Amino acid sequence: LLVLGIETSCDETSAAVVKNGRTILSNVISSQIDVHQKFGGVVPEIASRKHVELIIPVIDQAVHDAGIEKKDLDAIGVTYGPGLVGALLVGLSAAKAMAYALNKPLIGVHHIEGHIAANYLQSKALKPPFVCLVASGGHSHIVYAEDYHKFEIMGQTRDDAAGEAFDKVARALGMGYPGGPLIDKAAQAADGRLIDFPRVRFGNESLDFSFSGLKTAVLNYLNKAEQKGEAWDAQNVAASFQQAVVDVLVENTLRAAQRKQVKIVALAGGVAANSSLRKQMKGCAEAIGLEVCCPEPVLCTDNAAMIACAAYYEYKKNNISDLSLNAVPGLRLGER
Ligand code: ATP
Ligand code: MG
Ligand code: FE
């Protein structure tokens, strides 16, 4: 069973062909980073225009790379939310047009369910239930994946998402956009003593996160140093900030896993590409007998293979969308 996945929720134009929900035949990702970099973040209107330019060539490339023809496809899966509305509409319109022209089922996919599904591509034997940390540019969720279609949000951020905090701190450090990979790299080169930035916890019951206080603490640290005319060490600040984020992400995820008594912990979203998070999650989880699944970095950040995978499981459950499907920018997990 061959599913074409299409993803345009933010600044990646991506199309992929996945076989039987688990085998990637192609995964074409065209990133617009260069275009948005000079603005220090994604400009929605520019993102939509770029998607319009790229969507047809990217889809054609994905079909070509998979060594198939469009008529061989069994279904078209597409992200319909959450994300930037103008960006989502481009992928969605292309998917609808293809579904109509080829007379194949259209399957609307939740972007975050796609991120979680990346784990099924990474580990072919993985089956729910498991607990998944979803840490991305717009979300910081701890999700109990009870089944392929059943999700419970056990904890979430009360303010900034983890990726957002990475991006804002990187900007303050003058590193550029997107900040996550730059902070990751700078932190690896740090050799100074770590600054003790705050880790926010909400007591025993809650698995929620908060990153805005941490971001403010970093900004205050930089401002104070500047006022005193002292130089700050960007690598050391990056490492200290990253460690504070990683500590709470790992801690809460493992508490969630113990609460649900699952054997497996999975990672998803762009921040899951972070080398320190991956290492610490592995070390701490394995120490208490839990297995960790972390998709390779290209499957953590936005890509269409994860969308095709999630669409496959929707198809199996006969969750076919109508051609009137619309983009839902604020779509919540578990909603359709
Ligand atoms: P969402 O999935 O919530 O809609 P998004 O699609 O914009 O948001 P992703 O593409 O999943 O987010 O992830 C992008 C985020 O991941 C950015 O904030 C980026 O800085 C962060 N990121 C990417 N690589 C790393 C890394 N190595 N370390 C930390 N953060 C990273
Ligand atoms: Mg992106
Ligand atoms: Fe994403």
Image (cartoon, helix red, strand yellow):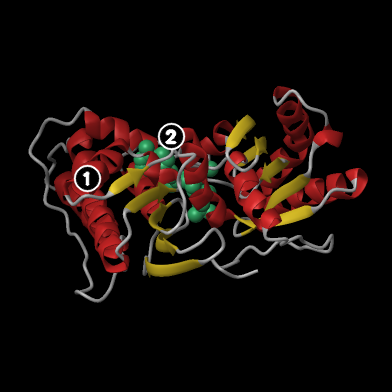
Can you give x and y, in whole percent of width and height, for residue 110 in the image?
61, 58
Residue for point 82% across, 34% down: 72
Q: Work out whether residue 46 can be spotted.
A: no
Residue 55 falls in image quadrant:
top right
In the rendered view, does 303 fall on the left or right side of 219?
Answer: right
Vertical arrangement, residue 222 with respect to residue 34, above or below: below
Secondary structure of the residue carrying tag 1 is helix
The spot of residue 319 in percent (x, y) is: 71, 62
Query: Which three-letter amino acid code belongs to the residue tagged 1?
Result: Glu
Say which residue label 2 marks. Answer: 296
Q: Quadrant of the N terminus?
A: top right
Residue type at mark 2: give it: Glu
Camera-side mark, 2 or 1: 1
Q: Look at the picture and state if 123 lies above or below 130.
A: above
Q: Are the two marked residues, 2 and 1, in contact with CB atoms closer than 8 angstroms? A: no
Q: Toward the viewer: 88 or 290?
A: 290
Instruction: Give the spatial CA distance, label 2 vs label 1.
Output: 19 Å
Quadrant including the C terminus:
bottom right
**Residue depicted at 17% across the width and 31% down the height:** 190
Q: Is residue 280 visible from the viewing direction of this image?
A: yes
Tag 2 secondary structure? loop
Mark 1, Cα crowd under 10 Å, few <14 / some 14-19 / many 20+, is: some
Q: Earlier in the sequence, mark 2 or mark 1?
A: 1
Residue with the mark numbered 1: 286
Q: Which mark is residue 14?
A: none
Q: Nearer the viewer, residue 200 or 306?
A: 306
* Percent of width and height locating residue 253: 29, 58
Dividing the picture into quarters, in which one does residue 109 lie? bottom right
Q: Position of residue 234 (x, y in %)?
A: 23, 36
Left-right relation of 96 to 151: right
8 relative position to 250: left or right: right
